[in-house]
Amino acid sequence: MRRPGGDGGLPRRATQTLPMITLALSKGRIYDDAMPLLRAAGVEVLEDPEKSRKLILPTSRPDLRVVLVRASDVPTYVQHGGADLGVAGLDVLLEHGDGLYRPLDLKIARCRMSVAVREDFDYAAAVKQGSRIRVATKYTHTARQHFAAKGVHVDLIKLYGSMELAPLTGLADAIVDLVSTGSTLRANHLVEVEHIMDISSRLVVNPAALKLKREPLRALIDAFEAAVGGAAWQ
Ligand code: ATP
Ligand code: MG
């Protein structure tokens, strides 16, 4: 069995070093928005992921490193101990399911999950008539729950990218996607017809790591919490 942390499996008590903490982040908006929080928690990442090709980045804390993974892989890394903690969008977490301790809303990478259709598609009428609506989305789990709760009949079509294209090509009548300013929808002649939920990124922690590395993880979670609270007035 591999141990959480994956640092070679040497008995920790044999060395004087602190246990290594691994934080999983995804490049792009989550990384960019998490940096001010890390800085406020007293941590500086020592390499720029946009310039370096490294996937493991050292930080100013010798016992803390950052691993760069794809946004939708963050929960998997954390759940199986490839990372002790990570930052992931609520959208990604809801698709992933249970198995993670979720102590904190970091209030970063905020957007909303919405239903959108072509400007010329009468969504309200389709719902009223009880027709089956073809919905393309990356978020099949959340979409299924949303439409089931409303009693709307849907055929879900799983996509991995560019949901906006689906209604334009006739692949689907509607999409479930993340929206922030709405400019992508407008540019593609789509309109938002339902707001499903507000989305932000959350700190997630491996429950076993929280037991094994309780002190340093607790301190880091507290520091994040203070950083989020401190930024709340902005
Ligand atoms: P990948 O690019 O690897 O397929 P992704 O597209 O989900 O993954 P990002 O675009 O970096 O990766 O999004 C990461 C997270 O940021 C999402 O899971 C979501 O929580 C949030 N997010 C996505 N789009 C927006 C947006 N327009 N505004 C704010 N936050 C967003
Ligand atoms: Mg993306």
Image (cartoon, grey):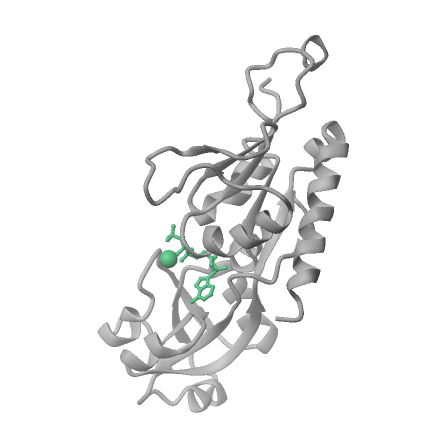
52 lies left or right of 211: left
The answer to whether residue 53 is above or below residue 94 is above
Q: Quadrant of residue 36?
A: bottom right
Q: Position of residue 208 (x, y in %)?
A: 70, 32
230 lies left or right of 92: right
Residue visible at 46% across and 54% down?
32
Residue 38 appears in the figure: yes
Q: Position of residue 73 (x, y in %)?
A: 47, 43
Where is the C terminus found, in terms of image quarters? bottom right
Q: Position of residue 223 (x, y in %)?
A: 70, 47
The answer to whether residue 201 is above or below residue 98 is below
> Observer-nearest residue: 84 or 15?
15
> Observer-nearest residue: 118 or 50?
50
Q: Residue furthest top?
A: 14
Where is the N terminus found, in terms of image quarters? top right
Residue 98 appears in the figure: no
Q: Position of residue 141 (x, y in %)?
A: 52, 59
The answer to whether residue 218 is above or below residue 96 is above
154 lies left or right of 119: right
> Observer-nearest residue: 151 or 181?
181
Please state the total of marks drawn on the protein image.
0
Residue visible at 59% across and 41% down?
43
The answer to whether residue 209 is above or below residue 24 is above
Q: Quadrant of residue 22?
A: top right
Residue visible at 37% across and 80% down?
117
Determine the quadrant in which ligand 2 lies.
Answer: bottom left
